[in-house]
Image (tube, rainbow, N blue to C red):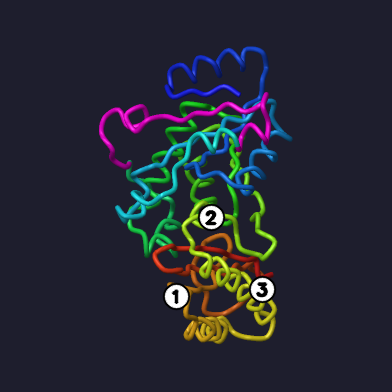
Amino acid sequence: MTVFKDKTNLSNFILKLKQRDTSIGLVPTMGALHDGHASLIREGLKENDVVVVSIFVNPTQFNRSEDLTNYPRNFEKDLEFLANVSEDHIIVYAPSVDDIYEEGVDSECFDFDGLEHEMEGKFRPGHFDGVGTIIKKLFNIIKPKSAYFGKKDYQQLLIIKKLAEKEQLDVAVKGCDIYRDKNGLAMSSRNERLTPLQLKAAPFIYETLKTAKIKFGTKSAMQLTQWVKAQFKHNDFLKLEYFLIANAKTLKTIERKSTKNKYRAFIAVYAGEVRLIDNIALN
């Protein structure tokens, strides 16, 4: 496993690999690696000779400074984790902030055709400009054939697909199924910050989504939303930030269902100071 902390050296190394017809995949991460990341890497290794795993806590996508400060970081532990996934077919790119943001830590402004204004965009202003900025930089540095993202961050996945389309970036953006713990909790680096009691309570999020999927066949979107709100009203460990049902392509919140469209339910919940998100396909 080769580790680079400088984009120039990384780009030169990748160029030599491509001259030998080596196909390159990319899995962007912010570290604190877990089995969900491993599932993305393994998916990338099925389709490519080598997968670049970037490890970079991107400051421009945090709209709360305390979240950036508290984000878990353990680089040596991450390297040990990756070595257990594949010793020979992973390249690690772990840049400094200065290596990524040479001209100042600022986001580029993007137009994602309105996707950025829905759901997370309403609660995390500027977040998707930060995401778009770092992903565009990584795509231009690494120039992968394919890049792999989990559907837990479904809105982010659609936005990155839109980024590749509008910026004419020659990368196949691929969404991979949500990787869950045995108890159903969606794997996330933020889970490390949960207390034992919060960790025990958190699977309630997915249980609620699964029941909502069943009820979606007989209840209206408004009725279902009110039902979910009621489930969290008296929960001592989990505070609902939002639950909504949206068109799976446009992410617009729906008022009435149509058999012509695909829908997903999206949820954001606080367990203390830790914010957890999840989603599920409804039809």
User: Where is mark 3, residue-wise?
Assistant: 210
- Between 262 and 181, the one lying in front of the other is 181
- Identify the element where label 1 is drawn: strand
Q: Nearer the viewer, mark 1 or mark 3?
A: 1
- Which numbered marker is on residue 94? none
Q: Which image quarter is the N terminus in?
A: top right
Q: Earlier in the sequence, mark 2 or mark 1?
A: 2
Q: Which image quarter is the C terminus in?
A: bottom right
Q: Is residue 109 above or below residue 208?
A: above
Q: Nearer the viewer, mark 2 or mark 1?
A: 1
- Give the amino acid type for the residue marked by disc 2 in the picture: Asp
User: Where is mark 2, residue-wise?
Assistant: 153
What separation in Å lies between label 3 and label 2 (alpha carbons)?
18 Å
Residue 244 at x, y = what percent? 51, 73
Q: Is residue 122 above or below residue 239?
A: above
User: Where is mark 1, residue-wise?
Assistant: 239
- Identify the element where label 3 is drawn: helix
- Give the amino acid type for the residue marked by disc 1 in the picture: Lys
**Region of the chain picked out in magenta, as a range:** 81-107
Residue 194 at x, y = what percent? 49, 62
Q: Earlier in the sequence, mark 3 or mark 2?
A: 2
Residue 274 at x, y = what percent? 43, 62
- Give the amino acid type for the residue marked by disc 3 in the picture: Lys
Q: Earlier in the sequence, mark 1 or mark 3?
A: 3
